Image (cartoon, grey):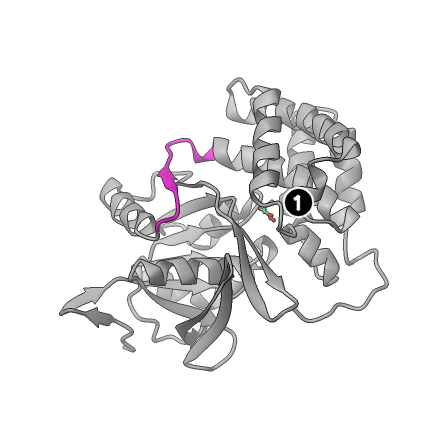
Amino acid sequence: MASNSQIENGKILPTWGILGAGAMGWLWTYYLQRAKIGTLLLQRQNTSYRECIIQKDSIFENCRTSAIKSDNPCLPALDALIIATKAYSVRNALLPLQEVLSSKQIPIILLQNGLGVFEEVRQLLPEQPILILSTSNGAYWHESAFLKLTGIGYSYFGTLDNSVPDSLKQVLLKQLKATGLPVLFTDNILKQLWEKLLVNCSINSLSALWLCRNGDLLDNRNSKQIWKRIVQEGVQVMRLELHQEVEPSEILTFIEQVAYKTSANYSSMCEDRRRNRPNEVDYIQGYLVRKAHQHNVSVPTLETLAELLKFPENSSLKPTPN
Ligand code: KPL
């Protein structure tokens, strides 16, 4: 079995795998390494390491991680595996790993925007400990040259079923907190995921359609009006899904806070549009619309957004790499 254990002062450091070398995959690689956690990037290429330049404030740092081809059957015993691919790629990215992950019972941590991925992964790996990390950290690729970290938000950590023993939750939480990023454990991660879903429905939709930074939406009368409609529609579905009261004004304030904290950021959906790449509409706006239909709730604004955001299917532009 290939070993990737890193040793410091005679102590074996924990090692986390990262599947997906996009902005969020590198952001967590960078912060985990700062917490003295070894990282192993699972990738399509066959190289033994990968590098990336990270800009934080005005400082540039080189981040280097060990790497392995993701279908390598000799995957070392990882302490956890962060899945940082786009929501629509998770299933296919996990397929070659299905056997090794379930035989070693490696805990999986999902980072995706939107909802619906947990159920897909649970179907693939019925016994696996699966956790969710819902974050509002901002990061984007600056002219494909380096990754710019643009804002720190709270990350909520939890699970949607009882597949994870408390002791394991505590160990993973401690390691996540060691990154210095604000990470909170929650017993109600579904509420956080719905709040984030409405943030993504609001910020990502408009920034992708108008090709602007998150912060540009803040002083814009049109965006405020549309956000109100999104929240009014979304909250009705959210209440029915969570069986609990939800205050629209609190969600609106949260959306504004995230837009403010990540004002320099291009949202992930805006980035996808700029590169003419597929986006996560089916897991964000589309998910909400599907749930609304199940509950017979009318969501005309969200339906229109879900249709407008069908990129690149409706575009004649050619995709550009990264
Ligand atoms: O989740 C995001 C995204 O871009 O997908 C936010 C929090 C809106 C940051 O841009």
Q: Residue placed at 35% from the left, 63% from the top?
A: 33
Q: Residue placed at 75% from the left, 62% from the top?
A: 276
Q: Residue placed at 22% from the left, 44% from the top?
A: 167
Residue 208 or 318: which is nearer the viewer? 208
Residue 239, by quadrant, is top right
Residue 322 or 264: which is nearer the viewer? 264
Mark 1 CB lies closer than 8 A to ligand 1: yes
Question: Mark 1 packing: few (<14 Cα in 10 Å), some, or many (20+)?
Answer: many
Q: Residue placed at 62% from the left, 41% from the top?
A: 200
User: Which residue reaches farthest right?
Assistant: 316
Q: Amino acid at mark 1?
A: Asn
Q: Which residue is mark 1?
A: 214
Location of residue 112 with respect to 186 vertically, above or below? below
- Magenta extent: 180-190
186 falls in the magenta region: yes
In the rendered image, residue 292, in percent from the top left (x then y), is placed at 67, 29
In the rendered image, residue 287, in percent from the top left (x then y), is placed at 64, 40
Asked if residue 128 shows in the view, the reply is yes
